[in-house]
Image (tube, rainbow, N blue to C red):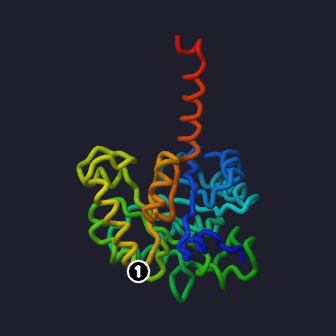
Amino acid sequence: MKKNTVKKKLASEKPAIGAWLSLASWVSAEYMAHAGFDWLVVDTEHSPVGFETTVHCFQAICTTDTIPMARVTWNDPILIKRLLDAGAMGLVIPMVNSPEEAEQAVKAMKFPPEGLRSLGGGRAMVYGSDYFAEANNEIAVIVQIEHIEAVKSAQEILAVDGVDACFIGPNDLAGSMGIKPDIHCSDPEHEAAVMSVLQSAKEVGKPAGIHCATTEAVNRRVEQGFQFVAISSDAGMLKSSASKIVSEITCLNQ
């Protein structure tokens, strides 16, 4: 089966850097994959991407060594099964607030006897004739800790067998704390919650991840010990680059 180099990096305590795909475009996915990220997540939760386009994004990413992943809309075994069968080599599961919800995600992503995933196969069988035998070892289970209740239970969530890493959603976490959403975590309470998750992850021996907006933030988070780190998205990068170009054209700013 195709090897998941992201899982290998995380297990070796190395950082794995990626980005979100929000433009609902396999062409964008192809360009982003050829940029050299370790992984790319097709965001099926907050983007308008359709299922067939998601599959095309996976196919485009697979023209490189970048690992194709997706953020599922919800912790639902049917949604999880479809994305895995379509070729996702890892899933980010949103709003996991308890060990029981983490266990639910793991079971949905694992073939029996470890889980309940149906042995249909689908497009994922292109990864190798041994897919059924090896998928449980290669598919990455990333649970999102993005609520203050999850922060309080982070150690128990990460201790669930089969969870490979957690990923902090800064904006939703801020919202659950009654703080203005801020990916930069400027509020001291917000940053303290983020660092609490990182400490819990270190105590359990599981990698922690977080979403960042800038390269400076990525470098800082990696230095702190975060491993599964995202920088912006294809949409965010397009917007910021276009805005910078427009700001530098004199006649557009008169």
Name the residue rendered at 52%, 55% in the picture. 230
Would you identify the image quadrant in which residue 197 lies?
A: bottom left
Vertical relation: 251 (above or below) 234: above
Numbered disc total:
1
Horizontal side, residue 86 vs residue 141: left or right: right
Residue 234, given in percent of the width and then of the height, sits at 59, 45
Q: Nearer the viewer, residue 235 or 199?
A: 199
Quadrant of res 68: bottom right
The residue positioned 69% from the left and 79% from the top of the image is 131
| Mark 1 element type | loop
Q: Is residue 30 left or right of residue 242?
A: right
Image coords of residue 235 (percent x, y): 56, 41
Hey, which residue is sitting farthest front in the picture? 223
Q: Is residue 16 above or below residue 183?
A: below
To which residue does mark 1 refer? 160
Q: Position of residue 92 (x, y in %)?
A: 49, 63
Residue at (58, 22) in percent of width and height: 248
Q: Which residue type carries mark 1?
A: Val
Q: Nearer the viewer, residue 124 or 251?
A: 251
Q: Name the residue located 51 percent from the left edge and 81 percent from the top edge.
A: 116
Q: Quadrant of residue 176?
A: bottom left
Looking at the rendered image, the quarter that the N terminus falls into is: bottom right
- Seen in the picture, residue 208 relative to 159 is either above or below; the reply is above
Residue 108 percent coordinates (x, y): 50, 75
Report the front residue among 165 and 15.
Answer: 15
Check disc 1: other Cα within 10 Å, few if <14, some if 14-19, many if 20+.
some
Q: Nearer the viewer, residue 11 or 90?
A: 11
